Structure formats: C-alpha cells, structure tokens
Image: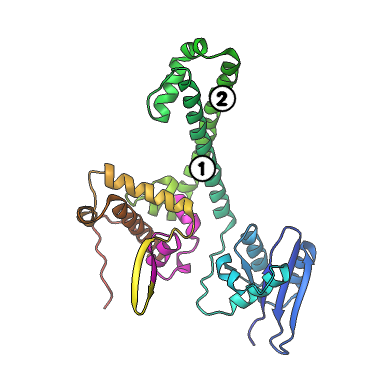
Amino acid sequence: MNATTYGLDLAKSIFQLYWVDPETGETHSRRLSKTQLISFLSNRTPGKFVLEACGGAHWWARKIISLGHEAILLHPKYVRPFVRTNKTDAADARAIWTAAQQPGMRPIPVKTEAQQALLGLHRIRSELVDSRTRQVNQIRGLLGEYGLHFVLGRKAAMAQFVTRLSEIEQTIPAPLWRLLSRQLQRLRQLDAEILAAEQEIAAWLKAEPAAQCVDAIPGIGPITATALVATMGSPQAYRSGRAFAASLGLVPTQSGTGGKVHLGHISKRGDPYLRKLLTHGARIVLTRSKRRPCWAEALLVRRPTNVAIVALANKMARTAWALLAHRRVYEPGYVSARPA
C-alpha cells in the first residue's frame, strides 16, 4: 500500500494539513497548532509530507524525518499555479498536495543543521560587508562636501581616513566630526566582525573534505567553496552538473513556439548569493589570471566579456558537482570522455 501524501502549509503558530485517504478517497483538512502537529506526526503511520521551501521548512523537514516520515520540499513557484481562487491556509495546503501529485516536480534537498548554520554565517558576513561598504561611501560623500577627497578603494580610503584625521577634524564642523569619529570606530568594529565570520567559515572548510575538494577549482576560494557545498546539500539531488548550474540561474532562458527555441539572458533563478560568488570568481579568472582556459580565450574573441564570464561560472558549478557526485579530486588537465 502506498504511503499517504500530506500537504503541509507552514506558519509561525498555526499549521494547515490536507490529505486524501488512499483507501476511501475521503479528503481531510485540519488546522493544528505546533504542539498538535508534532503529536499528530508522532502518532501517525509513516507517510510523505510535502512542504513549501519557506522559512523554517528545513527544520520542520528534519523534524518530520526524525519521527519516521518522508519530507519533501517544493519550490513555492511550483505550488502557486495550483492555488484555487482565494489564497488561504487551507487552499495553500491543498495546492501543495496537488503539486506533489504532478510528475517531474524536482524537490529541494533538505539541509542539515550544520549546512544551515554555515549559510547563516555567510548571510551575516554578507550583510556586514554591505554595511561596511555603505558606511565608507557615506563618509567619503560627506567629506567630499567639504572639499576633502580620498583615493578610490575601501582599504586605501580607510588608510587615508586614519592618516588625515587631524585635517578632517579641523575642516568639518564639530557636531559632524563627533558623529563621524564614531562611524570610523564602527568601521573598525565591522572589520573585526567580518574577520571573525571568515575565521568560522575557514574552520568549517578545514573540517569538510567536500569543501576542500571544491576549493581546488580555479576561481573558487574558501568563501565560495563552503557556500557551494552547503547550498548544494547532496549532489545526488541533481541529475547532472547542468541541472545544478540551471538551479543557480547560470543558464539562458528559453522561449519558443512552432519548434523554434530562442535563448535569452541567464534565468537568474536559485540562490543569488552563490551565483554572485561564482560570477565574481569567474571574472577574476578571466581578467587577472595568467592561466585562462583555452576555450574561454576562444570564446572571448567571439562573444562579449560578460558572456564568457557567465559561461565560466557555469563551468565552475558543473565541475564542482562532478567532483562531489563522482568523488574525484580536481585535475587541471582532465578531459572528460562520454561513456560508450
């Protein structure tokens, strides 16, 4: 007998369940609190619970698995077309159940607690870096209003902020200087917090063989390697390296009719943070590396630089998947052979 499939709509305190009894065909829709839901899961025969990949979904998926059930995460875009008329909790739960019945619905891998913690470190570091950049640009703009100009680049500007403190203090009004000096202290604190986050990420890299394997790929460093491994989860969740690259939005969009397919810009689906890291890494390889891939050199002759950069980012993602899926180490001169 097939396991019962449940559509579970998550919320902070109230949860909605929808399922169809496989023996009688009777439909059920129940509204449960968190305690009631856990009790329901504990006393129910093993089944398949389908959830939208939203806030808290990975924790609930791990909880459901620990209680002996199967948990499946679906992208919200797969569920939305099946919502009938008005959007309610009951309608969402039914739409999740309906989406689970459709063939070809690729699930999202359930992340472990360690993977989620690592991605949390990345999010914190990214926000700190953005805050530091905004702060430096604001200070540069405010001082520019008083005829004080500094060299380009964050590190160079910060060094000049320190060496020209007396000049800044004498030039700008006292009220502005008092607040500005605190902002400079805040920048030093941001540097320390970013360094602490990077040290935690480096420690995770040393303890994770998969991340060390990916770190050997040109254009991928410790930050990108750890983010890629944590985002991918299990490589078996993807059919191929192309499927993994497509999940990151590093493939062109397709539109066509009458047998004609037109390729457009990249789809930009999936995690924008990891896509940004891979794209920046590919840009460094093509613009600063002395050993650029031969195929990329030939592509740069025919196509714009940004096209070649995205193509290399796609190649990096596919290479990372191949290394992890087939448990290989990176070999610079390796040439893949299509199986007979």
Position of residue 155 relative to residue 61, above or below, is above
Q: Earlier in the sequence, mark 2 or mark 1?
A: 1
Membership of 242 in magenta stretch? yes
Q: Residue at x 57, y 53 (%)?
A: 116
Membership of 22 in magenta stretch? no
Q: Residue at x 68, y 86 (%)?
A: 22
What crowding class fits label 2: few (fewer than 14 Cα within 10 Å), some (14-19), or many (20 or more)?
A: some
Q: Element type at marker 1?
A: helix
Camera-nearest label, 2 or 1? 2
Q: Looking at this view, is 229 or 261 the one in front?
A: 261
Q: Is residue 58 left or right of residue 197?
A: right
Position of residue 140 relative to residue 323, above or below, is above
Q: Looking at this view, is 220 or 297 the one in front?
A: 297
Where's residue 223, x and y in %? 44, 46
Q: Which residue is mark 2?
A: 183
Q: Is residue 2 left or right of residue 280?
A: right
Where's residue 113, x and y in %? 59, 55
What's the amino acid at mark 2?
Gln
Q: Which residues are magenta?
A: 226-255
Q: Which residue is mark 1?
A: 126
What's the amino acid at mark 1?
Ser
Where's residue 29, x and y in %? 75, 76
CA separation in Å, label 2 and label 1: 19 Å
Where's residue 38, x and y in %? 75, 66
Indicate the quadrant containing the C terminus: top left, top right, bottom left or bottom right: bottom left
Q: Is residue 26 left or right of residue 323?
A: right
Q: Quadrant of residue 26?
A: bottom right
Indicate the quadrant containing the N terminus: top left, top right, bottom left or bottom right: bottom right
